[in-house]
């Protein structure tokens, strides 16, 4: 048949280069699967529409890595591999490992900051119970427990991680609660109340000492809330 075009385009018929196929001059992507899916690991920056999803995926991977390995044994490269991205992308979004940890902590701590208002708005005689329910309720929820484990395990083993935790807890939670007490030793009172709850969380959810580890949460709140209230407002 005359007037047809040879397969591969007109250049193929004349011996010229075939431009109909994909450009093979680009570097092939890293196709190793990430922990959170089977998509190949991307190199470089994603399109703008994908940026938020990519950032969230990195934070999810970071929380899991910090939770499982602690701060010292977690690396930016390991977070990137877990998220299925190039490590340069982690640095692009967050910077150093400390900055990745701080971003992961802030996201994980968001429910505490949100619930903080319910504590601050309560009558002074109810602050102890509300604070107890808020903190232990976060540990009871499996969704928020994992990032909290990452924070606690990292903070107790590494001073850099502990500093991030202190800045967030002291600046965003304890000082706000202390400001409501209108007492000369208000900051110490707030810290003692927080120490009571963090200690219970460590024993119940991290070390899992029985019978506290399997005790009914309402029974715990009933016993602990008056102690927390005593730290905050007792004379």
Image: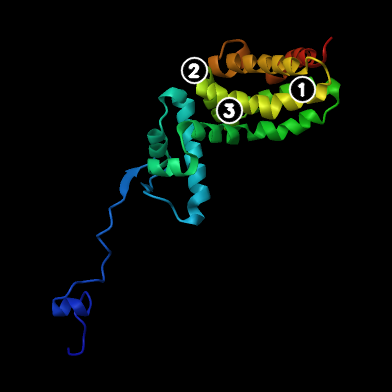
On screen, 12 above or below 124?
Answer: below
Q: Residue at x 62, y 32 (%)?
A: 109
Which residue does the numbered mark 1 point to in the structure image?
178
Please, which colouring scheme is shown? rainbow
Q: Position of residue 67 (x, y in %)?
A: 49, 26
The mark that comes first in sequence, 1 or 2, is 2
Measured Cα–Cα span from mark 2 to mark 3: 18 Å
- Look at mark 3 in the image and give the residue it sits on: 145
Which class describes the residues within 10 Å of circle 1: few (<14), some (14-19), or many (20+)? many
Q: Is 226 displayed left or right of 63 in the figure?
A: right
Whether residue 148 is visible, yes or no, is yes
Residue 157 numbered tag = 2
Q: Is residue 30 above or below residue 169?
A: below
Residue 157 position in % (x across, y down): 49, 17
Residue beneath the point at 67% across and 27% down = 171
Marks 3 and 2: in contact by CB < 8 Å? no
Residue 129's x, y, as percent? 77, 21
Q: CA distance from mark 1 to mark 2?
A: 27 Å
Instruction: Report whether 175 appears left or right of 76.
Output: right
Other-residue count near label 3 (Cα within 10 Å), few / some / many at <14 / 14–19 / ≥20: some
The answer for how far apart the CA atoms under marks 1 and 3 are is 26 Å
* Mark 2 crowd level (few <14, some 14–19, many ≥20, 10 Å Cα): few
Mark nearer the viewer, 1 or 2: 1
Look at 38% across and 38% down and name the residue there: 81
Q: Residue furthest left?
A: 15
Which of the numbered marks, if any, corresponds to residue 96? none
Question: Which of pointers 1 and 3 indicates the residue nearer the eye?
Answer: 1
**Residue 154 visible from this viewpoint:** no
């Amino acid at each position: 048949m005359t007037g047809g075009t040879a397969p591969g385009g007109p250049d193929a018929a004349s011996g010229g280069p075939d431009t109909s196929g994909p450009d093979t001059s680009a570097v092939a992507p890293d196709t190793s699967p990430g922990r959170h899916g089977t998509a190949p690991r991307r190199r470089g920056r994603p399109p703008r529409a994908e940026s938020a999803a990519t950032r969230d995926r990195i934070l999810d991977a970071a929380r899991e890595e910090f939770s499982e390995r602690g701060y010292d044994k977690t690396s930016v490269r390991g977070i990137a591999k877990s998220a299925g991205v190039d490590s340069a992308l982690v640095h692009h979004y967050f910077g150093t490992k400390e900055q990745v940890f701080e971003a992961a902590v802030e996201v994980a701590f968001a429910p505490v900051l949100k619930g903080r208002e319910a504590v601050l708005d309560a009558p002074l005689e109810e602050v102890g119970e509300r604070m107890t329910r808020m903190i232990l309720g976060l540990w009871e929820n499996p969704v928020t427990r994992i990032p909290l484990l990452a924070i606690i395990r990292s903070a107790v083993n590494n001073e850099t991680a502990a500093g991030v935790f202190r800045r967030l807890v002291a600046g965003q939670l304890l000082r706000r609660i202390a400001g409501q007490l209108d007492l000369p030793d208000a900051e110490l009172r707030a810290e003692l109340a927080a120490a009571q709850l963090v200690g219970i969380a460590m024993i119940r959810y991290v070390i899992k000492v029985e019978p506290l580890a399997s005790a009914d949460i309402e029974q715990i709140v009933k016993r602990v809330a008056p102690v927390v209230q005593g730290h905050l407002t007792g004379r």
